Amino acid sequence: MTAASPPEILRAPLVVEFPFTRSLGPVQSAFLTGLRERVVLGVTTADGRVMVPPVEYDPVTAEEIRDLVEVGATGTVTTWAWNAAPRRGQPLDTPFAWVLVRLDGADTGILHALDAPGPDAVRTGMRVRIRWAGERTGAITDIACFEPAEEHEGDGAAQAAPHAGEFADAVTGIVAEARLDYTYSPGRAQTAYINGLSQRKTIGERCPSCHKVYVPPRGACPTCGVATTDRVEVGPAGTVTTYCIVNIKAKNLDIEVPYVYAHIALDGAGLALHGRIGGIPYDQVRMGLRVEPVWTEGGSHPDHYRPTGEPDADYDVYKELI
């Protein structure tokens, strides 16, 4: 007789992405507009250091700083790391080195990619120069990457020159596309919960100490700190404990406003979960309303909850679950 194999833990790829829009102050505006014009600007701090990329406040005194200076397009590698497997959205799609480069006239390093044939071609102290992008829009990507320079190319002792930071059609804002790709696993407890939903069942787990039934289960009781392994089917009906009326339509959500989103304490559960209320005018939803789940064909979770027709639950029954 062989022992049953443990259930497979669910895993799935997950992508979170959104555009991040920000306005630029005078220093960052000048820096990015300068890149568009193939000019690299830094800022001089109170102690005379030149910082590239520039900052708006002195890191030592916290005073606002605006003294812009132009530095060279060549510089020296101060440290580096080889990237053998470039990822989506990185500066180069072939292996490259991440480098900190102290541009001529600057006292700090700028992080960017170095296009080199291999790690043997990169070393601390090597001379590099900016490879400008063919089309420049006023972004850090206007520096396509760095590339090796001749040993004596540029003047490593060059001084930063004052610059007014004034350009025609200055860049005043940027949109950065943020994206995070990863593999998500809900873990043992929520895998059982999700598998239960596929059978139109709601599975929670009971704490052996305080005896609360958590839905969705978390694998451990957040109050007692002990593992929850005793599975309990709850619901399907439940009670509205509190709710809100949604009046703003969410993007890509095919639900007409106004609608009601509620906390619902399923029968037998020790805390409420979220769900949309349907089948009743939004202004008739109330605390204590008894509801049941409505499933759509092929749905992986209840589409919404509707009134059961039962009398409202007494406040004392659900007051601890609000």
Image (cartoon, grey):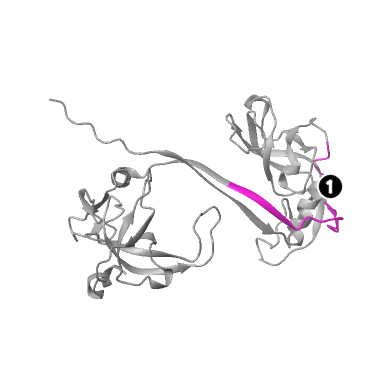
In the picture, measured across the screen, residue 266 lies left or right of residue 73, that is: left
Q: Residue at x 33, y 72 (%)?
A: 287
**Label 1 SS:** loop
Say which of 91 and 80 sits in front.
91
Q: Can you say which quadrant of the picture contains the N terminus?
A: top left
Q: Residue at x 77, y 53 (%)?
A: 31
**Label 1 sits on what residue type?**
Glu
Q: Residue furthest left?
A: 1
What is the quadrant of residue 154 in the picture?
A: top right
In the picture, measured across the screen, residue 16 lies left or right of residue 114, that is: left
Q: Is residue 185 highlighted in magenta?
A: no
Q: Residues within 10 Å of mark 1 (few under 14, many from 20)?
A: some
Q: Residue furthest bottom?
A: 315
Dominant secondary-structure state across the stretch colored magenta: loop
Q: Is residue 173 highlighted in magenta?
A: yes
Above or below — where is 96 with respect to 241? Answer: above
Q: Is residue 48 visible?
A: no
Image location (x, y in percent) of residue 25? 73, 62
Q: Which residue is mark 1?
A: 37
Image location (x, y in percent) of residue 61? 66, 66
Say which of 274 and 82 sits in front.
274
Image location (x, y in percent) of residue 49? 74, 55
Question: Which residues are drawn in magenta?
Answer: 154-178
What is the quadrant of residue 74 in the picture?
A: top right
